[in-house]
Amino acid sequence: MRTLVDHIGCIAGIERQGRLRLCGAEMDRMETLEDAWLLVEEGRIAAFGRRDDGVPPDADRRIDARGGMLFPSFCDSHTHLVYAGSREQEFLDKINGLSYEEIARRGGGILNSADRLHAASEEELYRTAMERVREIAVMGTGCVEIKSGYGLSTEDELKMLRVIRRIRETTPLEVRATFLGAHAVARAYRGRQEAYVDLVCREMLPAVAREGLADFVDVFCDEGFFTVEETERILNAGRELGLRAKIHANELAVSGGVQVGVRCGALSVDHLERSGAAEIEALRGSETMPTLLPGAAFFLGMSDPPAREMIRAGLGVALASDYNPGSSPSGNMRMVAALASIRLRMTPREALCAATLNGACAMGLSRDYGSITVGKVANFFLTRPMPSIEYFTYAYQTPLIDRVFLRGCPLHSFFAESR
Ligand code: NIG
Ligand code: FE
């Protein structure tokens, strides 16, 4: 099956050299091509070019982009989108002056979600998570990482991860699963944190690995949650079972999470609101991708991570939504990219690179996803005609996404109610 997308005003996010991530000044320079066509064959990008140089004459299906732009799908490398219920009561608590840490100390926060998840059936979790998956697909996301971490018991962590596996098997999105048993100390282990870490290492991780339910292991390494020593122990236990590390680090305090992540060869270290020169230095020369979650900092009213300093230091940076009920109840990656420009002073092109190619890299997917490159999976969306690439995140609320394609097929062929 050959599908030709013709009359494209501009193709954004082109990476011809097959680089797996872009760093520093390169992030602002992803190539574009005006007045173009793109050919899809068997779900992959077969070719693209300028209309002036000749449009391929034969195709089984023709799609008229009507002068709109073509963007590679977003690659959202950090979400918690499997959860039960919602936490708007804590939204009110925050408005009334409580901090995220205070809410957590009172047994709200992650433990609140754990109670709800315990009471929910696997079927109900799957159904509600699939609504969120459809929602993000319509907003342009094609690859997504989903974490466990609202189970906090072996049985409930496995329940969450089975839901993630079912999502992976039943959607056209590319899904990666992360085991986050060390998201918080379970209520039953209050005051016995060491015993909980033992449970994570000796029971949960082996059970997860036995069923092949996770690609990565993550720890919330931060003040009031898990220490650097505990984090290292859990990540090493994960590595022995073949799970690569990802970390929640430096969200609430200068936690040492970045350094332990780099030491353990983490694929990414995420959040980083509280970081500076020492963290940037630790990341230089490493393969670990700093991943910024401006939606969470925005929602919680926290300080912003030093994105400009990171890029100036030559680092590659990724952006992700952190979609979860407590600190970021949105998986809108276009909004995340807009926030990165508004709050972190990333240019729209840097933000686009961070939300696509570098996001794919932060979940080990950038060989096949994250840019317009011949041979990659044909995940992209078409917009209405726009005056520039920058306009897409500048006019961040205007409904500009016109049609979404995953594996070269229109989204509505997978989800009946989507465009
Ligand atoms: O990434 N920081 C830790 N975990 C999530 C929030 C989880 C929650 O509050 O439910 C985050 O922000
Ligand atoms: Fe998170």
Image (cartoon, helix red, strand yellow):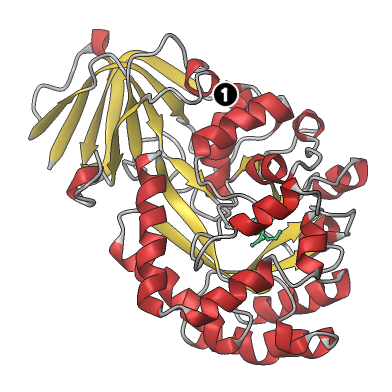
Q: Where is residue 194 in the image (x, y as percent from the top left)?
A: 83, 87
Q: Which residue is drawn at 18% across and 29% down?
A: 4
Within 8 Å: ligand 2 and the Cβ of disc 1?
A: no
Q: Residue at x 59, y 78 (%)?
A: 115
- How would you rate the neighbour count of disc 1 (Cα within 10 Å): few for under 14, some for 14-19, many for 20 or more? many
Q: Which amino acid does label 1 sit on?
A: Arg
Q: Quadrant of residue 33?
A: top left
Q: Tell me how many marks there are.
A: 1
Q: Where is residue 270 in the image (x, y as percent from the top left)?
A: 70, 52
Instruction: In this rendered view, identify the residue nearer to me: 266 or 207.
Output: 207
Helix, strand or loop under label 1: helix
Residue 326's place in the image compared with 375, above or below, is below
In the image: residue 356, left or right of residue 40: right
In the image: residue 384, left or right of residue 40: right
Q: Where is residue 2 in the image (x, y as percent from the top left)?
A: 14, 37
Residue 217's place in the image compared with 38, above or below, is below
Quadrant of the picture in which ligand 1 is shown: bottom right
Residue 255's place in the image compared with 291, above or below, is below
Q: Residue at x 82, y 84 (%)?
A: 193
Is the N terminus in the top left, top right, bottom left or bottom right quadrant? top left
| Residue 9 in view of the camera | yes
| Residue 243 in view of the camera | no
Q: Position of residue 175 (x, y in %)?
A: 43, 59
Q: Please name the residue that numbered disc 1 is placed on.
A: 349
